[in-house]
Amino acid sequence: TPLPMILGHEGVGEVAEIVGEKTDLFGRPLHEGDPVLWERGVMCGECYYCTIRKEPSLCPTRKTYGISYSCEEPPHLLGCYGEYLHLRSGHPMIKLDLDVAPEVLVPATCSGATAAHAVEQSALEPGDFALVVGPGPVGLFVLAQLLDAGAGEVWVAGTSADGGRLKMAGQFGASETINVDETSPDEIRDAVMERTRGVGANVIMDCTGYAPVVGHWIDLVAPGGTYSIPGIATPQDEISIELFRTLARKNVRLQGVWVSDTSHLWRAANLVAGGRYPFEKLITHKFPLEEATHALEVTESKESVKAVLLP
Ligand code: ZN
């Protein structure tokens, strides 16, 4: 993260000015005043991962608005904590015709897109039992994506500090919510095994972003299932797992999830706009741009689920 920087990689906006002509990715002309979404990542579109593997998330030169650009480099306005963001020509944009308030779409542009990517990679089958650990924005989006993809049942686990978020998980459709500070590992194991007739969880989505958590949950994955780690977005301490018993003997897949591409953004935006889940509840706080530091403090304290800046 090259400083100084304008932060902010999740955002929704309105076209202020266009140089030349520009269409959105459906070929619709964009005009000043149009509400728009855009891909937060800048991929080359020409490399092995962008073309042959069709996994632009893995583009080796991928950069992200609000994360990878210093505001010292032209055109300077490259993060969403600002009144203006300068998007490169050729950048994928979507003219918004979705029936939803702009601030409710903000988390779809990173948390939601990453969640869509995680569920796509999870090999979930209709009727599967899934467990989400960590009910933050990514976890709640994962919950909704799992249900939308046909999960038979989704349980969500969190800590006492996640109290409000666990309650929200129930409102999103989690069948059970587990407070790990009040429930022993044995009680959790017994409950999952009983509910799944001894099979275990077909998919576990670890959205905590905290590596030691893996050791607490990975044994609950059913043979043939997936343990996914969409929460891991920064370097972590090493962890130790016994490969034969944990993965090999059970055909279990340990799945990394790195960011997302425009298909996932589109899927997340549609999920939000579809109205089947109460995504408006995610936006617990709104602040003017001048209070961005306070917004970050509120986020760190977990007092908010999503705090949105309204520049
Ligand atoms: Zn590329």
Image: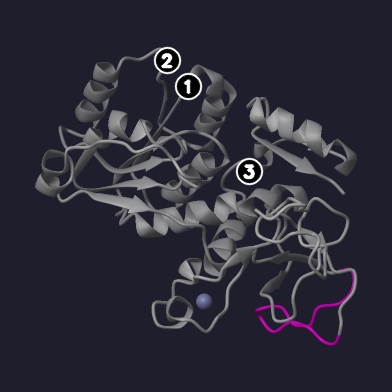
Indicate the position of residue 121 as horizontal and vertical percent values.
Answer: 37, 58
Number of residues whose C-alpha sits closer than 10 Å to that of mark 2, classed few (under 14), some (14–19) or many (20 or more): few
What residue is at 20 percent from the left and 48 percent from the top?
252
Amino acid residing under circle 1: Thr
Query: Dot 3 corresponds to which residue?
Result: 279
Q: What residue does disc 2 label?
A: 181
Q: Which quadrant of the structure image shows residue 176?
A: top left
Q: Earlier in the sequence, mark 3 or mark 1?
A: 1
- Residue type, numbered disc 3: Phe
Q: Quadrant of residue 241?
A: top left
Residue at the far top in the pictured view: 182
Q: Amino acid at mark 2?
A: Asp
Q: Secondary structure at mark 2?
A: loop
Disc 3, ligand 1: is the CB inside 8 Å? no
Judged left or right of residue 267, residue 147 is: left
Left or right of 296 in this view: 43: left
Q: Measured along the vertical axis of the image, is residue 239 above or below residue 74? A: above
- Where 9 sits versus 289, above or below? below
Left or right: residue 182 compared with residue 303: left
The answer to whether the residue labelled 1 contacts the one labelled 2, judged by CB atoms less than 8 Å apart, is yes
User: On residue 159, which mark appears?
Assistant: 1
The reply to whether discs 3 and 1 touch (Cβ–Cβ < 8 Å) is no
Whichever of callouts 2 and 3 sits on the residue coming sooner in the sequence is: 2
- Could you say which disc has been placed on residue 14 in the image? none
Q: Is residue 270 left or right of residue 55?
A: right
| SS type, badge 1 | loop
Boundaries of the magenta span: 20-33
Q: Main secondary structure of the magenta part?
A: loop
Instruction: Tell me which numbered mark, 1 or 2, is placed earlier along the sequence.
Output: 1
